[in-house]
Amino acid sequence: MDIGERMASLATKIQQQKSSIETEEATKNAFVMPFISLVLGYDVFNPSEVVPEFTADVGTKKGEKIDYAIVQDGDVQILVEAKTVGAPLSLNHASQLFRYFATTNARIAVLTNGQHYYFYTDLDRPNRMDDKPFLQLDLLDLDETLVPELQKLTKDSFDLESVVSAAEELKYIGAIKRVLAGQVREPDDEWVKFLTNRVYEGAFTQRVREQFRGLVAKASRQFLADQVNDRLKAALGGQPYPVSATSEVTAEAAAEQSIEESSNQDERGIETTLEEVEGYQIVRAIACSEIAPHRIVHRDTKSYMGILLDDNNRKPIVRLHFNTGQKYLGLFDESKTETRKPITTLDEIYSHADAIRDTVRRYV
């Protein structure tokens, strides 16, 4: 298996066992050691590669321990500090990482709770661990663009200099993406003014600010939905269903419909996420091989998004249960009994394409 497949395998294990893990020691045994072994490729039972409970005297601190030290070429290169799965990751609770980073040859420090992994180096000051990570991984919501960077830390491909040289770029790209995500969810005044001044020639008054705040939020969500549609169209090689000019629904119109419906749902305390919109568009892309796409409609609730044929509750196609840590795809059999299938990524919806099409065919 390549590193992506190994990470997916570990993610499945986390999904299945996370709820039963209650201690830091159990987290290390169930998730952290498999990450070091399965994903990074180090022998956790060979003390010349992985040293558990790594101990060194640091100033007046005697006998302090770090959970794991990973060794390459006889030198400690990576330090790992683990917390209980589900616990927030805060450097306030990982002071050992700071102290050990300055007294060993390690250039990489990792803070993890078994699901989330924060990677640190010394970009700001030599031999002093940075306050902010240059790379963040969530094994249950993996950003695949980061996998090649993680590959550089594996035993067989260890390339520390390459990781460190790319760390600054990774750090700021990740930070910018998080800022953009925040602006999509809730644009601030500065962002609203920045975009408004590029499309509106009048004075930026309070009334204009309030008007464009909603427009900026809506345009941002619609833009992202359009990108999802473009990716789907490229993956599917174009529209597979031959529809007439009167019944054809463009990707842009579908995205706009989704956003407008989402705005109405917000008023009822229902939040339609971009992930749900993307899931809906994937199901729609699958089902439109059988029926006209405008007949595939979504209705969001507080607990799931239902995707229906002809906007009819008696004709459910699938349900998207994305409001909890574990995502589920709800499929329906001949008696309309729902079976929930756990999924890690939205791409896994495609593996259930035959079942989705079978459901649609039963209604037409």
Image: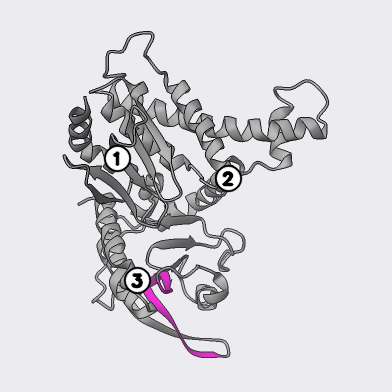
Q: Is residue 82 magenta?
A: yes
In this view, the residue in front, 58 or 346, is 346
Instruction: Look at discs 2 and 1 and give the one toward the viewer.
Output: 1
Query: Which of the 4 quarters of the picture holds residue 102?
Result: bottom right
Report the residue marked by disc 3: 71
Q: Amino acid at mark 2?
A: Ile
Rounded to the nearest whole Å, what is the CA distance between mark 2 and mark 1? 35 Å
Report the residue marked by disc 1: 318
Number of residues whose C-alpha sits closer than 10 Å to that of mark 2, classed few (under 14), some (14–19) or many (20 or more) = few
Q: Amino acid at mark 1?
A: Val
The magenta stretch is 61-84
> Given contact means CB atoms under 8 Å apart, are the residues at marks 2 and 3 in contact?
no
Q: Is residue 202 above or below residue 325?
A: above
Rounded to the nearest whole Å, what is the CA distance between mark 1 and mark 3? 48 Å
The disc at residue 176 is 2
Number of residues whose C-alpha sits closer than 10 Å to that of mark 3, classed few (under 14), some (14–19) or many (20 or more) = many
Q: Quadrant of the C terminus?
A: top left
State which tag comes first along the sequence, 2 or 1. 2
Tell me where residue 134 appears, x and y as whole percent: 51, 56
Instruction: Look at discs 2 and 3 and give the one toward the viewer.
Output: 2
State which tag comes first along the sequence, 1 or 3. 3
